[in-house]
Image (cartoon, rainbow, N blue to C red):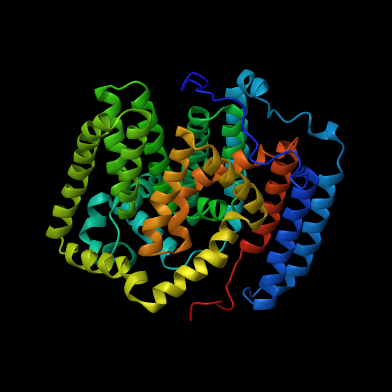
Amino acid sequence: MSGIVRSTQTPQAERPFTLSSRWVSIQAVLILMTLLEIGWVGAIWVTGATAATHKLLPLAGVTAVLGAIVLLLPERFFAWLPLSEERIARHETRILLVAGLLIGAVLIIFASQQRIWAFDEEGNLWASAAVAKEGIRGLFENYERRPWLGKQHPPLVPIIYGLAMKLLGTSQLAGRTVTAVFAVSTGWLTYFIGRRLFDRQTALLGALLLFSFPLVFRLGAAAMVETPLTFFFTLTVWLTLRLVERPSVSRLLWVGLAIGAGLLSKYTMVFVLPLVFAIIAIRGSLKQALRYFGVMALIGTVFLAGWLLFANQMDVLRQQIVTISEYAGLVLTNEYGRRVLFESMTNRLPSGLGVYNLPFLALGSILVVRRRRQADWILLLWIASVWLPLSLTLPDHRYFLPSFPAMALLAALGLLQVPKGAARGLLLSLLLAASTLYLYVDWARASELFVK
């Protein structure tokens, strides 16, 4: 696995603050992370957002204990973590395999306990079970009568899940196991991208911090469209970086195929197109971007056009166009859409990223905005390519998931700005994520904050 990509390292990460800013210390950051998480629990209690109020006081107590433990542990307890560039390079394959197996196991355990996601997960499981039992033809014969699928989604995800469920069985856990594979694969891709853009240390921290985002874990353990879409989105970014490094017809075709697979998973995959163009223009040249982009867009369009013609024959295309048109104007033409945007930005997305990760994200943002290297621009454009169009169309917090690998790498850059903070910051982030999932495993929203 270590031979898959070449490490294109940049110099050691720069600190965005002067040494006189003494508050940027690991002690201050750990205390801030703990207080933010306790404040988040308190906000849930005050607003009555959860039905499981009995969990809040124990969760606040556990948060305080975890923060104190990580803060007070002697340095020798962190020496075994292979977070240095040299140790990662020496044991790269072993680290990636062990981390993937551990995360995959925890995802499946969480998947066995997490409550069902109404409508979206139920709809995908029903469609996937139909593929497993009746074959792909059975799915298309009843496509328009599947409310989750027929009116708004292309067919690739239930086909993939259905084919896998032929081997694993048609249970909910079987479908969620497929999602866990997509999630772990996205983590590996995050590492490979981070290694290309920055260095091994940033890459590994980013890949691990990705799974400290509660929304990644919740959707990575649910049989829904968002995690496969995020995989294809991230795969497209990685393949594009490889294409720019060593152009070839085969690599160009692979990028086009990844875009096509994403478009057949969910139409919001279209957000990757300007990002692909920008990566080629930044790492190569504008002329190269224009030439390659045309070929890749053509390949993806052929896939999408074939599906749209087939959808028209099944008489579902008209309904899907109506649904997409309504969603596309939700924010700009509808007060409800603007309330959804406000709620997503003020509480759902911070909760999905983990409020305890906000210090790392802030430090990373300051660094890349001040430094503005090629890799920094790619990271910022990756985030903007998802956040900007969704903020103008349909800002449901789940739909931002394709930007989360870039957010994780941004958080890793921020964590590295804290002197001697990588091991403690990463450990506390993962521990607080685990405690947060205790609340989310059977999450039932008792009241909306802004959306009525």
Q: Quadrant of residue 105?
A: top right
Q: Residue at x 70, y 37 (%)?
A: 422
For image coordinates 71% across by 60% down, the residue present is: 37
Direction from residue 326 to residue 172 in the image, left or right: right
| Residue placed most toward the observer, 380 or 206 | 380
Residue 316 image offset from top left, x and y in percent: 19, 64
Viewer can see residue 56: yes
The answer to whether any part of residue 264 appears in the image is: no
Q: Is residue 425 above or below residue 189?
A: below
Viewer-nearest residue: 397 or 226: 397
Percent x, y of residue 318: 17, 66
- In the rendered image, residue 123, in percent from the top left (x then y), is placed at 38, 63
Label count reads 0
> Residue 43 lies in what quarter of the image?
bottom right
Q: In this view, does 109 lie to the left or right of 143?
A: right
- Image quadrant in which you'd find residue 39: bottom right
Direction from residue 74 to residue 329 in the image, left or right:
left
Camera-nearest residue between 82 and 439: 82
Residue 162, percent from left and from top: 36, 49
- Name of the residue lying farthest toward the bottom: 452
Work out whether 443 lies above or below 98: below
Q: Nearer the viewer, residue 299 or 274?
A: 274
